[in-house]
Every structure is written in C-alpha cells, then in structure tokens.
Image: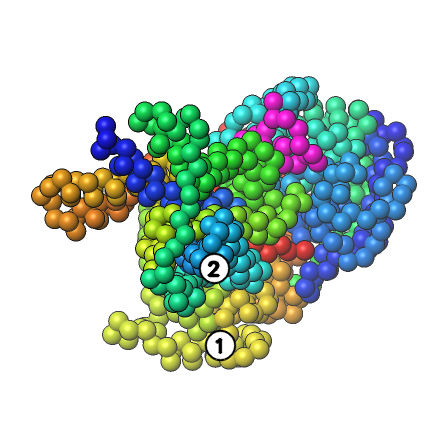
Amino acid sequence: MSALEPMLLTIITASTPLLLAAIGELVCERSGVLNLGVEGMMIVGAVAAFGTAYTTGSPLLGIVAGMLAAVALSLLFGFLTLRLMCNQVATGLALTILGLGLSGMIGESFVGEPGVKLSQISIPMLSDLPLVGKVLFGQDVLVYASFAIVGLTSYVLFRSRWGLILRAVGDNHTSAHALGYSVLRVRYLAVMFGGACSGLAGAYLSLAYTPQWTEGMSAGRGWIALALVVFASWRPGRVLIGAYLFGAVSILQFHAQASGVTLPSQLMSSLPYLVTIVVLVIISQNRQLTKTNSPACLGKPFSPDR
Amino acid sequence: MASGTELIRAKGISKRFGETLANDNVDLCLNKGEIHALLGENGAGKSTLVKILYGALEPGGGSLHWKGNLVKVANPAAARKLGIGMVFQHFSLFEALSVAENIALALPKSVPLKQLCADIIEVSGKYGLPLDPTAIVADLPVGIRQRIEIVRCLLQEPDLLIMDEPTSVLTPLEAEDLFKTLTRLADEGCAILYISHRLEEVQRICHRATIMRHGKVVGACDPAKETAASLAQLMVGGDVHAVDAGAQAMPGKALLQLTDLNHAGEGAFAVALESINLSLHAGEVLAIAGIAGNGQGELFDVISGEVKTKAAYDINLLGVPVGRRSINDRRRLGAAFVPEERLGHGAAPDLPLSENVILTRHASDKDLVRAGLLSRGAALRSERRLAAQYDVRMAHENPEARALSGGNLQKFIVGRELDRSPRVLVINQPTWGVDAGAAALIRQALIDLARSGAAVLVISQDLDEIYEVADKIAVISRGQLSEPAPKDSMNREQIGLLMAGLGEAKQAKAGKGH
C-alpha cells in the first residue's frame, strides 16, 4: 500500500507534461498542420516559466509567462508555414533547434538557482481518502488542468461546431474554403492552441517536475508527445491513455531497477521508447484505425485560388 | 412549371484565366420553376460561369440581378444566403466526417445534431433521396455522395439549384431518381441550372437551353423542339477549320493493337473500359474523340503502361504483347507517351528541364547514360536543342518545369518525345490549355511524325483539333470505343451523337447481330 502511493504520484508527474504537449499537438494536427517544434516550444515555455516565477516569486505568473512564450514561438511557426507556406516539417525542426538554443541562452543565469515549486491543491475531505485521496485530489493546478483540457478538447472537437469546422479544415481544406470557411484563421488558432499547451507542459517541467532550470530539461518529451498523437490516432481519450502508459513504463523501470531486476540498465531506460515503438507498429497495422482518423490534409500547405 | 417570373439575370459576365478568356460577355437569365440547361463542349466556359454565379470565382466583369435587385456574390456563403445552392461536379465533401456533419458545415448556423438528423431524414425521404445521417462519407458510393450534396442544398430551401454534370457519375437508375427529384423541385418553384453533355437528358427534363462555345453564348433554344442532332451541332459549332494535313500515304502495318481490352478502373471516379478493339497503323493519325471522363484517362494509362492490364496479349505494341510490361519497356520498343496532365505526369514540376529529359528517356536513349551514370551534359544539350527546335520560351537557361507557361511546357514535353523519333506516339489532350500558336505547332509536328511513317494516337476533346490532325476518328463514350472511321466519312453531328452516348444503342444492336 505505502509503496504504491509514491509510485502512482511519480507516474502522474511523469505523464502530465506529455499529456499537455500531446493534446495541444493533436488539435494542431487535426486542423491539418504538423508542428514538429513541440520540443522547442516546450523548453522555451519551461525557461520563461522558471524565470518569471524566480523573479516574481509567483508560480502562477510563471505558468502564464510559459504559455505566452510558447504561443509567441508557435505564431512564428504559423506565420512561416501558413502565410509564407514554408515546408512544415523543416520549419518545425528549425523551431525545435531555435527553442533549445534560445532557452539555453535565456536560462544561463538561472542554472543552479533554487526554483519556485508549484503548490499542491488539496481538495478538502476527498484528499484524505485512503490510497486514492492524495493521488487524485492532492495535485497541483496543472495536473487538474491537463485532465480538464483533455475533456474539453474532446467535447469541443466532437460535439461543437467549432470542432466540426476544425476537423473539416484538416480533412479537406479546399472544400472547407469552398464552403466559405477561413482555413488560415482556423489553422492559426489551432497552432496557437498547440503552442499554449506546449508552454503549459514546459511550465510543468520547470515548476513542478523538477523546480529548477537545467539546459535541455525537456529531454525529448516533445518528440514523445508527437509520437503519442499518432499513437492515439488523433483521439483525445487515447492521448490520455498513451501519455499515462508511457509515463507508467518509464517510472516502473526505475522501480524495477531499484528492486534488483538483472536486466542491463540501458535496456531498462530504453523500455518506454521500445514500448512506444511497438505500440505504434501495432497501431499502424490496423489501417482502419489510422486512416479514418488521420487528418487528410496533414502537412499540406493551403493557398486559395481565386 | 415555368411561371415566367425572372429569378436571376447575369449580364456581360467575363472571366479571364491567364491567356484564355473563359467567359466572354455572357448573358444568362432564369425564371422561377424552370429547368434550364447549359450546354457546351469541355472548355466552353460553363463551369466558370456557374462558379461565378455561386460566388466561388470572382467575375472579371458584368453584373448580376437576383429577383430584380443588383447583387454582388462575394463568396459561396453569400450565395447560399441569397438562396443559391450548388452541387459540384467534383464533390466538395469531407470524407472523414459523417453525413450529418457534412451537411451541418454548409448550414449558416449551428443546429443541434439530433435535430439536424431528423431534418435530413425528413427532407431526404420527401424527395426520394434516402440518407443515413450517421454514415461516414468515406464508406459511401458515389451516387449516395451526390445525394448528400443535393440534400445539403435542399435543406437550405434554395430558389436556384445549380448542378454541374450531375449524371456523369451516376448509374442510369440513379440518374432516373435524380430526374424525378428535379422535376418535383421545379414544380415547387425552384429554378434549376443544369449542366450536362447528355443530350437525351436535356431534352427530357429541361424547359430551355443556353448554348456556350469558346466562352461565349452562341444560342438559346427549347430543347424539346430540337433534335439531339441539332443540339449536338449547336454545341460543337458548324464551322470547320481549314485542314492542312498533307496527303496520307497508304497506311502501313498495324503498330499498336488493342484486342478485346477490358479494364476495371481504380478509384471512385474511374471509368471501366469495356472490350476495346483498335488497330493503329504506320503512317496514320487516329484520333479518339469524347467528352471528359468517359474513359480517356484510363485508356491512356493502360496503353502507356502506367496501369498494367490483366492479360499481356490485350495490348500488342510493335508485335510484342506488352499488357504486363512497364512504361520503360514500352519506350524501349519504340513507343512514346504524352499524358494529359503536364505537371506531375508529363514533367516533374520542381526539376529543371534537362532532368525532365532524363526522366522519360534514360531507359531508351543511350547518350543519356554512360556506364550506368547519368550524363548531365548530354541532357543539357538535348534540352537546348529541344528549346530551339520547338520554340520553348523561357525566362532563363534550363528553368524548372513549373516556371514554364502551359503552352511552352507542352511544346517542350511533346518535343522531348518526338525528338526520339518514336514509331508509336500516344498523346492525350495534345493542346489542352495551349494558345493557338503553340497548338498549331504541336499539331503540325504530330502530322509530320505520322507522314514520316510512325503511328500516332491522339486522344482529344477538341473536335476542331481532331479534324485538323486526324486521318481516322473513333469516339469513346462510357468506356466503350466506336469503330474508327475515316475522317471524311464522319461529320460533327455523328460524332456529337456518339459522344453523347446515342450511338451505344445502335452499336449494341449491331453487336448482337454478329
């Protein structure tokens, strides 16, 4: 019992940044834009959040700053790919490189400084429940937010007119344009949403996961988030499952190593990635699953002809 | 029926695309409750006109009166607001979405999905177009997809419904249902602008017809009072260009033979080829006429080898059965192919012209490949020679294919193939979208090639062109090919009838007689 609770808590901590970044990218890709710059936006969000929280002492201001910084970066991506119609893949990769470099430069003076930790919000009564109390009802605001965002995204995407328009733009931008919808406006908004979520994920890393700044602290999580979107076949509910599966495997392998499993540690550390690859391969086998959900216009530039 | 009240009046509509005037001072007027046919050959400007009425294209000039008031239709949403609905020739549906979601997207404001599903079932039932609102479009056949588009329009209770070649993708039975729906709509006062090539259809259901040719309105009539033959004549125009083809030598032996070629098309819009027989002789130009989408693309693909047939022997090229051989194998035998689509098929848009030379000729030209390595110098020399010989105008040396205008690129592509002195040339739409000067050059080159002893197969939708270049003419309609006949024995009327599918019945009877 007592060993289980910390394990569950660390799994949530490991999964939350992945979940936040992946759900943002999912919305972005549903609109037909492939933004490979998640890693870059995430780390810029992390350094902005840390710096602001460190200077002002307010982690909430830090979260806002992290979001804004990542949105700014996503707007740059949007301008390049939507307005100037640059190649989305190349621009996304460049965005990641830019983000990693920029954050290292900005964060140079923060290295080694003590951070401000985002406080937990205990929901009275419920957080005292045995076993699940602290796990489910004693988390920080970003963990709650991550679940709320997934629920909200799922609702908006599949139950509202906005979501319908967004999916339509991602499926067939020519038809959407012919019906009189502004393809570029929808895509700008989706790209910005993706940026905001990446920023939240970054803020979570530098304010809650490890409340300090280290260069490159996103450590490839942006790429995992990208893979999770495919893993989830562009469905919010499956992103939730995927993020927690990955988070769980990466935590469990630590515990397995600690409890003396004799497998080489390198193999154990690569386990989450191997699991992701295996699941991706299995999912790709099922054509029906990927085909009907993957946005048909993903990565294609749009220019109306008149 | 036609109540005589004017609904829409278009006056002096013009639209220019690059060098071509797609609409030249077009006038059109529709009354309430009238089914009005818009007739014309491909490229006559019908689609351009209706897209302007629907706000999908901006007119270059002219005015539009709707119910007596001067209006400006800025976009399709504005058109729908006025009460204009349109069913596109190529559907504008979202495949990943459900029927109800597709329809919801075209409605001006949000309707609860449950309410919408009920509405869809009610309206679609009322007009005999049953639909399942929850089905995903990707799973539905073409006929049902069109139904979605129609119901989508009907839910907005339009006063004018524009239909761009609605029956071109329908089975006869589906078309029959459509006619019932249209007649019923007209009885309720809705005007319908109906674009079609099928003259029997037009005669059956349309009250009036406007005929377009080369972007201009050339006439109006009551289709019921015309014969299919007179309509066909109005459509293709009586005037024949002067033919300067030189004397045809006695045709030599057959170089390309299609024997009972059957091929089921792939994809939703494909046309199946049905028992096609054809022999193409040395020294002749054989032209295949037909309206777009009757199997020309599919026929070209199997002859060129882009798509392989089931049996090797149904295509015989220079004495070799090649049905299962690759394009390059066929090129090595001495054939050359010019597809319809220039960018993407005929040439790689982003590659310079010299590399586009390599693309189709690396297998058959010994100069281009030395010891397994490409010779860029030889490719460049070919490119320069072609540019000079075929008058390819370009802004700078060796540009990318996409930088060339349509006519110039076509001259280059045709030149590239002719430069090899092929023994068999198959060309689809040789001068589509090409200006008059370039077109004349290309046609002359085709004739000269045939006179030098090669066999040339031209697939074209342009009757003027066919009369200019062809020695023999065959007509393709719904995947079936008529018996090729000497040009002099075929007049435009006969071709028009065969194109519109009126010849099928006769052929079927003749077939049974054998």
**Is residue B152 found left or right of B219 in the rendered image?**
left
Label annotation for residue B389? none
Residue B57 visible, this orientation? yes
Residue B322 visible, this orientation? no
**Front in this rendered view, residue A23 or A103:** A103
**Is residue A245 found left or right of B34 in the rendered image?**
left
- Judging by the rendered image, the residue that carries numbered circle 2 is A55
B183 relative to B443, above or below: above
Residue B68, quarter of picture: top right
Residue B176, quarter of picture: top right
B100 relative to A166, above or below: above
How far apart are the alpha carbons under marks 1 and 2? 59 Å
Residue shown at the point (67%, 41%) measured from the top left: B164
Question: Is B97 one of the magenta-colored residues?
Answer: yes
**Front in this rendered view, residue A300 or B476:** A300
Crowd class of label 2 (few under 14; some 14 to 19; many from 20; radius 10 Å): few
Please state the horizontal and vertical placement of residue A191, each as a whole percent of the image: 52, 51
Q: Are marks 1 and 2 on the same chain?
A: no
Question: Is A168 one of the magenta-colored residues?
Answer: no
Outermost residue on the left side: it is A262
Residue A133, quarter of picture: top left
- Judging by the rendered image, the residue that carries numbered circle 1 is B398
Q: Which residues are magenta?
A: B95-114
Mark 1 vs mark 2, foreground winner is 2
- Tell me the subunit letter for badge 1: B
**Front in this rendered view, residue B497 or B199:** B199
The amino acid marked with disc number 2 is: Thr
